[in-house]
Amino acid sequence: MRRIAGILITLLSAAAFGTLAIFGRLAYAAGLDTFTLLFLRFTIATLLMGGLLALRREPLPRGKTLLQLIGMGGIGYAGQSFCYLTAIKYASAGLVALLLYLYPAMVAVLSALFLKEKINRSKIIALLIALTGTALTVRPGSGQWQGMLLALGAAGIYSIYILVGAGVMKQVSAFQSTPVIFASAGVVYGGLVALNGAHWPVDAAGWWAVAGTVLVPTLIAVTAFLMGIQYIGPTDASMLSTLEPVVTVILAAIFFSERLDALTLLGGGLILTAVILLTRDETSRQM
């Protein structure tokens, strides 16, 4: 029962993460800009996650670990979020979500280059599949280049964020790290809002979009993913998270009438297949 619960909770997390591009589009339609949306997202989430940390009676990180977490939030998470939510202005939400899932392949390559991890045959096959999927998804005739480059940038920043965070997260719990990461990103976007001016929602629908962004793809998604890791482990949780771009594609079709052509869907399918192969390879190594 514990494993079944873990699987269901992780799938809930993936589905919740898959709504981010949808709420982002709705927020933009209501007059918000990227800086204001992310400032509200991270500031409100910090307050709520800080309250959860207090209920758990866990201390905030200190010293070097605290500084590393501030860097992860203020540079890594802030940069990834900006690229992702800016990308959906120029490319379809489904396409952006699929390209983001190149990050596991990027992690494998960066680990080999900088951490001297060996790339075995399974990883090579997965990387070739990912490259093929990328070529089908990002091709000369598909247009939307600015959005696709930003989506690839989001994947690249996220892969570095994961590699840096792997060591830091050994020192603290996820519940201790998340408020610091959110707060750091919130401070960055608070500064950008102060410099560029705030663009608040023009109607109630905009505030509902903000509330949805904070609640669903932030608090519910993060909390459910952490619970999923506790129940079934990080590797299986990562594999199940490939549901996220599928949810984004479906919701974008429902709410925005977005349609991805057959080659783009095939390319996205290959990218997700590569993610599953990489995750299964990691599972076999841990057994």
Image (cartoon, grey):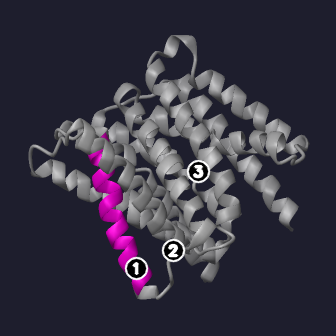
Q: Residue at x 66, y 73 (%)?
A: 171
Give me the C-alpha separation between circle 3 and circle 1.
27 Å
Mark 1 falls on what kind of element?
A: helix
Position above or below: 169 against 141 = below
Residue 240, x across and y down, in percent = 61, 58
The residue indicated by pointer 3 is 242
Quarter-wise, where is residue 102 in the image?
top right
Give me the C-alpha separation between circle 2 and circle 3.
23 Å
Give me the C-alpha separation between circle 2 and circle 1.
8 Å
Identify which amino acid the numbered label 1 is placed on: Leu
Counting residues from the start of the chain, the first of labels 2 and 3 encountered is: 2
Residue 141, x across and y down, in percent = 52, 11
Identify which amino acid the numbered label 3 is placed on: Thr
Q: Residue at x 38, y 43 (%)?
A: 21
Identify which amino acid the numbered label 2 is placed on: Phe
Mark 2 falls on what kind of element?
A: helix
Q: What secondary structure predominates along the stretch shown in magenta?
A: helix
Frontmost of labels 2 and 3 is 2
Pick the front one: 141 or 40: 40
Q: Is residue 42 magenta?
A: yes
* Residue 52, disc: 1
Numbered disc total? 3
Query: What is the span of residues highlighted in magenta in the rendered image?
Result: 35-54
Residue 1, x across and y down, in percent = 61, 83
The residue indicated by pointer 2 is 175
Q: Residues within 10 Å of mark 2 (few under 14, many from 20)?
A: many
Asked if marks 2 and 1 touch (Cβ < 8 Å), the reply is yes
